[in-house]
Amino acid sequence: MKRRDFITLLGSAMAWPLAARAQQPNRIRRVGVLMALDENDPAGKAFLSELTQELAELGWTDGRNLRMDVRWAAGNVDRLLILAKELVDLQPEMILALSTSVTAALQRETRTIPIVFAGISDPVGDGFVADLPRPGGNLTGFINIEASMAGKWLELLTEIAPGLKRVAMMFNPDTAPRGGSYYRPAFEAAAQSLKVAPIAAPVHSDAEIEQVITSLGQEPGGGLIAMPDVLIMTHRAQIILLAARNNVPAVYPRSLYVRDGGLLSYGPDPVDIFRRSASYIDRILGGAKPADLPVQLTLKFEMALNGKTAKALGLTVPPSILVRADEVID
């Protein structure tokens, strides 16, 4: 479904009353949470903290009337599969899934326990739901980035680094939406329009990440788009360091990359997604069915710029980016 066809439905979904507010029974309700990140990752801690705070505002307090069983996969696909089974075996009343790979692992384990996904890209294409307004099964949740965003990232990258001749789109085919093919058409169409050579760069390890970025820096004119992917997220420190070392301008899907030293980011506010996912947890605990809760689109986007990184790369930031940036780090 196109975004323009979904606006009316989305607006009505956001206006619906929350089902369980002030109606929780005395018994402790059990909720599973499966995170793709490492438990020591500051971003993962911040996301979980935001979720916990929002649930508390809705009347659900961990240790009082709620038990949250949280598991961390640390970007490891094999570990992810084990943890998905472990959580399902606990028989929680519902599970919150963070990322496409987490959602897929949980779906393989259960078709009955309600699952809310927060921050995936292509729930219909990946077979999680039948339709956005009518999911039809035991899954529903929140989309973070649509396929067209790949073209926007390339436009921004060529805007801040106008001398680019080739740009690599880096992703892990084991965890990216549709194995990475979800974003490629928009990326390649934008590359043709901007007269930039597009490079699909699948990676599975530190060594492959280093190989891609090093090769981009061997000649002038190389740029990088880091896709919204679990492997990319968990290896962001290495990617940011290699991009700086090899003088490769890069654009990222979230502002936390820029706070960690990355050049430029544009994408959804993940904290906002976590806040909104709490409302679906609340409603399901109150008796709502995932099949009746429409998948919702991202409402809040943000752009961040690291001025120090731009200067180190020898880039002059155009006013068009400065005026649009929600956050500028000098």
Image (cartoon, grey):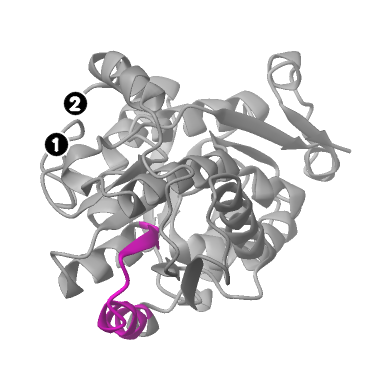
The answer to whether the residues at label 2 and label 1 have Cβ atoms under 8 Å apart is yes
Q: Position of residue 228 (x, y in %)?
A: 46, 50
Give me the residue at 66% from left, 75% from top.
40
Name the residue: 39% across, 22% down: 15
Q: Residues within 10 Å of mark 1 (few under 14, many from 20)?
A: some
- Residue 1 tag number: 2
From which residue to which does the magenta span run? Answer: 80-99
Q: Quadrant of residue 57?
A: top right
Q: Is residue 94 inside the magenta stretch? A: yes
Tell whether 250 sits left or right of 148. right
Q: In the image, which is nearer the foreground, mark 2 or mark 1?
A: 1
The residue at 53%/56% (across/down) is 60
Mark 2 packing: few (<14 Cα in 10 Å), some, or many (20+)?
few
The amino acid marked with disc number 2 is: Met
Q: Is residue 10 visible?
A: yes
In this view, 201 is above or below 190:
below
